[in-house]
Image (tube, rainbow, N blue to C red):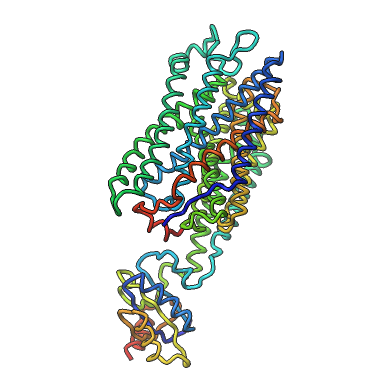
Amino acid sequence: MNDRFVIPARLRNTSLALILIGVITLIAGAASLLTSHADTDKTRFWLVLLQDSIFFTLITTVSVFIQAAVSLAQGAWIVSFRRIPEAIGANVWVFGLIAVIVLFAVAFGFTDSHGINTIYQWTTAKGDKIIEGKSAFLNKGMFAFFTLTAIGLWSFFGIKFRTMSLNQDNAPKNDTKLYWKVFRLSGVFLLVYALTQMSTIPWLWIMSIDAHWFSTLFSWYTFASAFVSGMSLIMLWMVYLKNQGNLVLVTTEHMHDVGKFMFAFSIFWTYLWFSQYMLIWYANVPEETTYFVMRQHGPYSIIFYANFIINFVMPILILMARPSKRNYFTVTFMALVIIFGHWLDYYQMMMPGPLKANWHINWYEIGVFMGFAGLLIFVVSRTLAKSSLIAHNNILVKETSIHIA
Amino acid sequence: MAIKKFAVAAYDDEAVLFPAVSKVRKSGYKLHDIYTPFAVHGLDVAMGHKETDLHIAGFIYGLCGTSTAVGFISWIFTSDWPIVYGGKPHFALPAWVPITFELTVLFAAVGMTLTFCYLNQIMPGVKKHVFHPRQSDDLFVMAIELNEHTPEGEVLEFLKSTGAVETNVQVAEDSWWYGRWDKKEEYEALNAG
């Protein structure tokens, strides 16, 4: 059983065109925004890069997480399309590298005309009681350590899972040695993931933008946001490869399962989003409510409500029915909507603090997003084309081919 | 509710059962039901059952729960007995969301359970004919309804050819009766005769 994916010229040209748009946008952005006299323009230049590199790093890491979680649960349903999360996970390092460069540039190199880092204010704050109180954790050393460790480990496990899966193809038939090795490493990865993506990393990368404010739920909330968009990304690749005639083992049943993840974790995201909102609204403590005053009643109120409608109302109404999770059109449409919605969610997490009312979703934001999307399509399709799309020697391959959702 | 004649076949393997089901459906015999010790994935599709509407009922029950909660709480807190809690407005929607959610789940769950019991005609005290004592143990039991056009000998022969380990003919109540064990003895007498 062999199922090779040959990159269609159209896909490669599209991805290269998107990358080109991204690069041109970046150059144009550097030329116009970085040379601008207004500090908000410089902040906008870095903040948009920061938002996109964090967003793409986190949603690609989700592919490593889903492999680990399903391997540990000994689930067979994922095996029919496991090469997709493997290929996305093996490319975490690409986005991780960009994220490291941008994060370090922002945290260590970026200051406005008054010598203040407007994005990570804690790096330049002097005599601020609240930030000094957090300095045991929130300092440059910790930031560098956690950033490098997290991205290093995510990239390592992403590549490791793919290598082990490819080695299984050449292993003797029904050899379970690698299967149990993946099983054990999955446990290790979940621990790593819990200590990075589900706790420290969102604190350092995103929550520290509003350094005076804190929320204990924040990391879970950003995880849910990344997870649901990561599953949508897998769904998009699945539908695309299925339309190319690949992935012969994937049936509507497997698609239904990924669709369930998209649906269920949209609800989970709403649960966390609302839990965070309601507790702050109810307790009404001024240092906590400032966060939502800016977002709900200030200049970001459009994004605040759009976020809720796109990420909760649309998935629950459109994806709830069984037939819609088994239909190529609705799942593709919803996957695109969810990815856009959660990109917007990350936007409203990061922009209000530094940019205040001067936010734009304009040529620069869209161009940078397109560049990252093009890069994702380019690297993932290259990795997918390198090996057979069916893990034909995986010991669960029989189970996955008769799977019923 | 009527007493009918059934040809009963017991299978000991799913791999035999599925082809047998499709053969029975092709042959045109009237498939009454299949009794299995556990939920067999895909058997409903193989038997030709259409997708259940239970989840649509569940959605409607859920909407009833949502509207009951929002309607009732908003009536209490805005018109019947308005009290200021913690400086919040009377119409304090975020505070009601947890209760609204709970009632939505409660209505959907209870409503779907009752609907499920109604659709499957199960209730405490409701009796049904058991075609084979091992249908809840290790056998898959298929019952085919017989009529004057389907001679029992021919049907039993056919069932044996599909791989059944046991076949017999039973005269039994086709749906249910309520708590009358004397009535059950009547059926058993019919079966014996």
Question: Who's the residue at 35% across and 44% down the image?
Answer: A167
Q: Residue A362: x percent and y percent?
A: 71, 30
Count of numbered tags: 0
Please indicate whether residue A288 sits to the left or right of residue B146 in the image: right
- Is the residue A308 above or below the residue B31 in the image? above
Q: Is residue A269 visible?
A: yes
Q: Residue A249: x percent and y percent?
A: 46, 57
Q: Residue B91: x percent and y percent?
A: 66, 37
- Is the residue B42 above or below the residue A387 in the image? below
Task: Say which quarter of the image contains residue A141.
Answer: top left
Question: Who's the residue at 51% across and 33% down the image?
Answer: A58
Between A5 and B127, which is closer to the camera in this rendering?
A5
Question: Who's the residue at 45% across and 38% down the image?
Answer: A90
Task: Say which quarter of the image contains residue B192.
Answer: bottom left
Residue farthest toward the top in the current orientation of the protein? A127
Question: Who's the residue at 49% across and 30% down the image?
Answer: A219
Quarter of the image where the N terminus of chain A is located: bottom left
- Is the residue A333 above or below the residue B159 in the image? above
Q: Is residue A263 visible?
A: no
Q: Residue A326: x percent and y percent?
A: 55, 57
Between A229 and A11, which is closer to the camera in this rendering?
A11
Between B47 and A366, which is closer to the camera in this rendering?
A366
Between A71 and A341, which is closer to the camera in this rendering?
A71
